[in-house]
Amino acid sequence: MNVIQTPLPGVVVVEPRVFGDERGFFVETFREEVLQAAGVDVRFVQDNQSRSRRGVLRGLHYQLVQPQGKLVRVASGRVFDVAVDVRVGSPHFGQWFGIELDDIAHRQLYVPPGFAHGFLVLSDVADFVYKCTDYYHPASEQGIVWNDPSIGIAWPSAGVAPQLSAKDAASPRLHEQARDRLPAYAP
């Protein structure tokens, strides 16, 4: 496995070795010691999986109570995955990093607590899998609208209009979100 630092401190790309032949492939999707060596020293407590069709956009989500770090990957299909620093006081506040994740290269993205996370499905169907550092706490889940112009995420086209949940469509822009509804930066 190779771990690549991104322009956002704490957000890393994990590139596993994929062993393939005419029978299929083998890939190691998690190795604690590799992440620890790269500065990601976390404990995962919950695994999740979602299935979505082309054009579904989920996010941008984060939790205030029990903030979650997420190690995300695509088991099948292709998505554009995004992390946004929403920590008040962070030198990178409002900045984003995006990467295409798929079932060919098997790259993963680690999104630390304090970052909003979202993804857009680019294939007909995608199975999205992620490990979380804390448990889901629905009462404290927050969101930032996916197309906030002050963030300026360059979402690729999925060939169809983005499909959002009613909750995601009603999320505020980052500058409209109450400061007590955003995580604080702790250097």
Image (cartoon, rainbow, N blue to C red):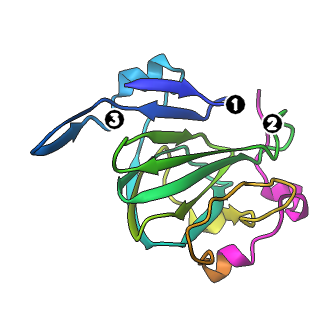
Q: List x then y, in percent, for residue 108.
A: 45, 41
Q: List x then y, in percent, for residue 178.
A: 87, 61
Q: Residues within 10 Å of mark 3 (few under 14, many from 20)?
A: some
User: What's the distance in space between the residues labelled 2 and 3, CA to CA?
Assistant: 28 Å
Q: Nearer the viewer, residue 168 or 65?
A: 168
Q: Is residue 145 left or right of residue 88?
A: left
Q: Is residue 36 left or right of residue 24?
A: right
Membership of 183 in magenta stretch = yes
Membership of 124 in magenta stretch = no
Q: Residue at x 82, y 42 (%)?
A: 93
Badge 1 element: loop
Between marks 3 and 1 in the image, the one whose residue lies nearer the viewer: 1
The magenta segment is 168-187
**In the orientation shown, which residue stands out farthest toward the left?**
23
Give the vertical position of 39 relative to 108 (above or below).
above
Amino acid found under the numbered disc labelled 1: Pro
Q: In the figure, residue 114 lies in which quadrant?
A: top right
User: What's the distance in space between the residues labelled 3 and 1, CA to CA?
Assistant: 23 Å
Q: Are marks 1 and 2 in contact (CB under 8 Å)?
A: yes
* Residue hosting label 1: 7
The C terminus: image quadrant: top right
Q: Residue at x 34, y 50 (%)?
A: 103
Q: Which of disc 1 and disc 3 is earlier in sequence?
A: 1
Q: In the figure, residue 184 lies in which quadrant?
A: top right
Q: Residue at x 19, y 41 (%)?
A: 25
Q: List x then y, in percent, for residue 1.
A: 36, 25
Q: Which of disc 3 and disc 2 is earlier in sequence?
A: 3
**Mark linked to residue 30:** 3
